Image: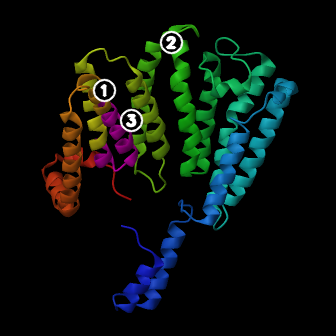
Amino acid sequence: MRFSKRDLDWAVSEGLIGAAEAEKLWQGLADRTDGAARFDAAHVACYAGALLVIGAMGWFMTAAWEDLGGVGIFAIAALYMAAFWFLGYRFWNRPGGRVPGGLMVAVCVSITPLAVYGLQRWLGFWQGDDPGTYRDFHIWIKSGWFTMELATVAVGLLALRVVPFGFVTAPIAFALWYMSMDLTPIIAGADDFNWDLRKIVSVWFGLAMIAGAFAVDRRTREDFAFWGYLFGLIAFWGGLSLMNSDTELNKFLYFLINVVLIFAAVFLRRRAFLVFGALGCFGYLGHLAVEIFEDSALFPVAVTAAGIAIIALGIVLKRYCAKWEAAILATMPAALRRLRPIER
């Protein structure tokens, strides 16, 4: 349940709480939630600026940087990292500075691949073959990027111990997502790998990321699981959706897995599972419409009826969901109930 200062003012006007107590409660809640993301001008500006810097030192990197050589790239990237860490840590320890401070630390972590690339270019050391220019890091899947990704995860985890800010997990999860793809040529023993193997690795690595996110979900005040869930779902669902399902049974199993994702969204209280599960279910229904029931005039009618039934189910759930959830939780084994993340 979310409430605002206006709700507290209403409670005061109704005599439910005194004005002094309401002000004290609001100030305490404000101090407790310092650093939580909010959709206001200040937070939007901070996040937009951080994303611009991350993009500038990543996707928008120009080929002219290669003229600096490995030592030049490493020196500049290391200087950027030191500056953002210094500023971020100072802001983090100031009242009201948790968001800008945490974002600066996240920027510091996001520059790690560039610093490691410069160091590797300087020393001539690569995991596998030379992967090419840094701009190719976001384009091509190659084993040479693995060291950069591993270093980003390590630096990110160290940063989290000092500055426990949720967005710091974003570059960690992003690096793990890339790692799920760049591990494939390492497992295959060459960059000329089988794409079916890439899909399998992506599925299992995505499941591992989801499991890791679940292990830390709701265990702390900060949300450290969101980005792990998101990129884990991208790796798992993406690899699963790209697999060649040559039989209708396999396609139906894919549909059932997406239904499980929708139920997982309820159990975990994470909308991302609902989005990916719904996309997979719509994809399967599209397959039925185009290939299986192409000449059936009744198929759109049946799907429409199913959609209306789901809407009706949603209306019923809105009315009785709390009672049903309480009844289900009461019959759920205690061990399984303890696994469910608590609601924030």
Q: Are the residues tagged 1 and 2 within 8 Å (C-beta)?
A: no
Q: What residue type is labelled 3?
A: Ala
Label 2 secondary element: helix
Q: Which amino acid does label 2 sit on?
A: Ile
Q: Which mark is residue 187?
A: 2
Of labels 3 and 1, earlier in sequence is 3
Write the residue at 48% across / 72% down.
29
Q: Name the residue under label 3.
A: 211
- Quarter the C terminus occupies: bottom left
Residue 282 on image: x %, y %:
32, 36
Left or right? Give the position of 15 relative to 154: left
Write the residue at 61% across / 22% down.
146
Q: How far apart are marks 3 and 1 (CA)?
A: 35 Å
Of labels 1 and 2, earlier in sequence is 2
Residue 328 on image: x %, y %:
16, 52
Q: Name the residue under label 1.
A: 290
Residue 138 on image: x %, y %:
64, 28
Q: How far apart are marks 1 and 2 (CA)?
A: 37 Å
In which quarter of the view is residue 253 placed?
top left
Which residues are the magenta region? Answer: 264-284
Magenta stretch: residue 272 in it? yes
